[in-house]
């Protein structure tokens, strides 16, 4: 339905502009904060959120998804011309530290979450 797609794109665009205006003075990217708030609102609304998503937002998102290559292809074409990220030994060491440190932090946080979830599941089984 073309009207549903247009309404979905308009709704997503309006939400984006509201977030842009509301978060003008905050250092958080408005699209990231708005996306998180939208997901939280849809989850909090439960069944009404599912209906809103399926009737209004999903058709607009599908239309935008079809046009994504138009927006991203020019940037990907120019990517080989970009300045190298690692130009000195110091940059290579810093990048390695970020990658290895990020991996360690990710593994540790995942292990902690699994241990907490396993503990919660075993506590539920004992009751």
Image (cartoon, rainbow, N blue to C red):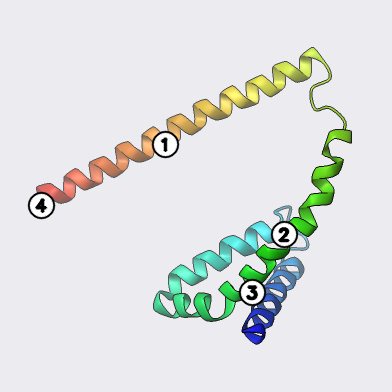
Question: For the residue labelled by badge 4, is the local secondary structure a helix, a strand or a loop?
Answer: loop
Closest to the observer, 116 or 67: 67
Name the residue beneath numbered marker 2: 68
Task: Please give the label number shown on residue 60.
Answer: 3
Question: For the residue labelled by badge 3, is the local secondary structure a helix, a strand or a loop?
Answer: helix
The answer for how far apart the CA atoms under marks 2 and 3 are is 13 Å
Question: For the residue labelled by badge 1, is the local secondary structure a helix, a strand or a loop?
Answer: helix
Residue positioned 57% across, 65% down in the render: 37
Q: Position of residue 17 (x, y in %)?
A: 75, 72
Name the residue beneath numbered marker 1: 110
Of callouts 3 and 4, the N-terminal one? 3
Of callouts 1 and 4, the N-terminal one? 1
Of callouts 4 and 2, the N-terminal one? 2
Task: Please give the label number shown on residue 127.
Answer: 4
Point out the image quarter for the N terminus. Answer: bottom right
Of callouts 2 and 3, the N-terminal one? 3
- Does residue 73 appear to the left or right of 42 in the view shown? right
Q: Nearer the viewer, mark 3 or mark 4?
A: 3
Q: Are marks 1 and 2 in contact (CB under 8 Å)?
A: no
Closest to the observer, 14 or 26: 14
Q: Position of residue 85 (x, y in %)?
A: 80, 27
Q: Nearer the viewer, mark 3 or mark 1?
A: 3
The answer for how far apart the CA atoms under marks 3 and 1 are is 34 Å
């Amino acid at each position: 339905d073309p009207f549903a797609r247009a309404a979905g794109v308009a709704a997503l665009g309006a939400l984006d502009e509201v977030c842009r205006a509301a978060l003008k003075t905050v250092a958080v990217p408005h699209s990231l904060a708005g996306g998180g708030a939208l997901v939280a609102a849809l989850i909090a609304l439960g069944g009404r959120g599912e209906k809103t998503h399926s009737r209004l937002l999903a058709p607009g998102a599908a239309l935008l998804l079809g046009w994504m290559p138009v927006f991203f292809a020019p940037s990907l074409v120019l990517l080989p011309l970009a300045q190298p990220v690692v130009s000195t030994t110091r940059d290579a060491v810093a990048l390695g530290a970020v990658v290895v440190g990020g991996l360690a932090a990710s593994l540790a946080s995942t292990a902690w979450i699994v241990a907490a979830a396993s503990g919660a599941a075993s506590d539920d089984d004992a009751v």
